[in-house]
Image (spheres, rainbow, N blue to C red):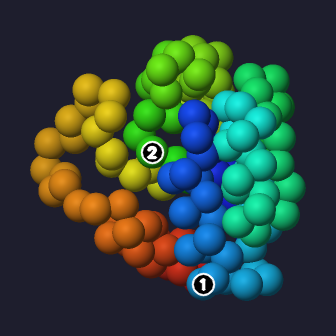
Amino acid sequence: MKIAIVDGQGGGIGKYIVEKIRKEFPEQLEILALGTNALATSLMLKAGANEGASGENAIIFNIDKVDIIIGTVAIVAPNSMMGELTPRMAEAIAESRADKLLIPLNKIGIDIIGVKEEPLPHLVEELVKKIKIKEG
């Protein structure tokens, strides 16, 4: 199974997600780090992603080549991440046929009703459980 993790700005969230997934699935999953910038991609690669690419074209080109897309809810919101995530990136991610596992961190003014606020480590644990279910 191939997973894309999309992150931007400092790349800390993507790095954390890659570390946790790599720990749970040492060899089974291929992780593609897609950063809105080179710093985010670099951190995800250092955390254990198999491959990485940066920028709008790289995200648009690669997003349909994966089974699962992971990131915060911001990855489907145009101009999020202080403008780093372009409308074309958000559209490509949202329209991809890949399953999307989105972490509901509210840094972009989108509240998802019915979702309780949890710290990032708890949310990533839930993410890992979902991947285990999808992997079968």
Tag on residue 108?
none
Res 64 seen here: no
Mark 2 or mark 1, which is nearer the start of the sequence?
A: 1
Residue found at x 74% / y 73%: 29
Location of the C terminus by quadrant is: bottom right
Residue found at x 57% / y 34%: 9
Indicate the position of residue 89 as horizontal and vertical percent values: 64, 24
SS class, disc 1: helix
Local crowd size for mark 2, using a 10 Å CA cut-off: few (<14), some (14–19), many (≥20): many
Indicate the position of residue 41 as horizontal and vertical percent values: 74, 45
* 70 on left or right of 34: left
Residue found at x 71% / y 32%: 37
* 131 on left or right of 72: right
Label 1 – label 2 distance at C-alpha = 20 Å
Residue tagged by mark 1?
24
Residue tagged by mark 2?
72
Location of the N terminus by quadrant is: bottom right
Indicate the position of residue 116 as horizontal and vertical percent values: 16, 56
Residue found at x 77% / y 62%: 46
Q: Is residue 133 above or below residue 95?
A: below
